[in-house]
Image (spheres, rainbow, N blue to C red):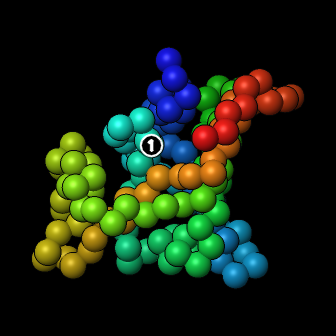
Amino acid sequence: MNVTEKISKFLTDAGAFFVATVDGDQPKCRPFGLHKVIDDKIYFGVGDFKDAYKQMCNNPKVEIVALKNTDWLRLYGKVVFEKDDAIANQILEEFPYLKDIYNEKTGYKMAVFHLEEATAEFRSIMKVEESYQF
């Protein structure tokens, strides 16, 4: 199992995970659940009308945390938004309930991103068990 698959499996097994951004000098954190691996990259989606999106545009450094029993994952890096709608369309096809939110009628669009200059730390309560940079 490569690093991308390992991260994706942990996120899936955890269910919800939390994405932290910065709003000015105030940290902000919210639950996410959607991620998708395409061509060995993990993609996430956020509404382009949401504060989280605006915060990522202003400061692209984010941290993602997921907990599974007593093990947890810290994934951090720089957000890179996709310019091509193909990946967003692929995600919408796989998760059709999102089409109720992101469509021409609502005017909402899903901004898809992945992380670059990233670090994934697989941690136990006491220490970092494994760390990967990608």
Where residue 131 sits, quadrant-wise, is top right
- Measured as percent of width and height from the top left, residue 106 is found at 19, 76
* Residue shown at 53% from the left, 75% from the top: 57
- Measured as percent of width and height from the top left, residue 23 is found at 65, 77
Extreme residue in the top direction: 1
Residue type for callout 1: Ile
* Residue shown at 42% from the left, 52% from the top: 44
Question: Which secondary structure, mark 1?
Answer: strand
* Residue shown at 54% from the left, 52% from the top: 115
Front residue of 2 and 127: 2
Label 1 crowd bin: few (<14), some (14–19), many (20+), radius 10 Å: some
Q: Is residue 11 visible?
A: yes
Relative to 127, residue 94 above or below: below
**Which residue corresponds to mark 1?**
42
- Measured as percent of width and height from the top left, residue 55 is found at 56, 75
Q: Is residue 13 visible?
A: no
Extreme residue in the bottom direction: 24
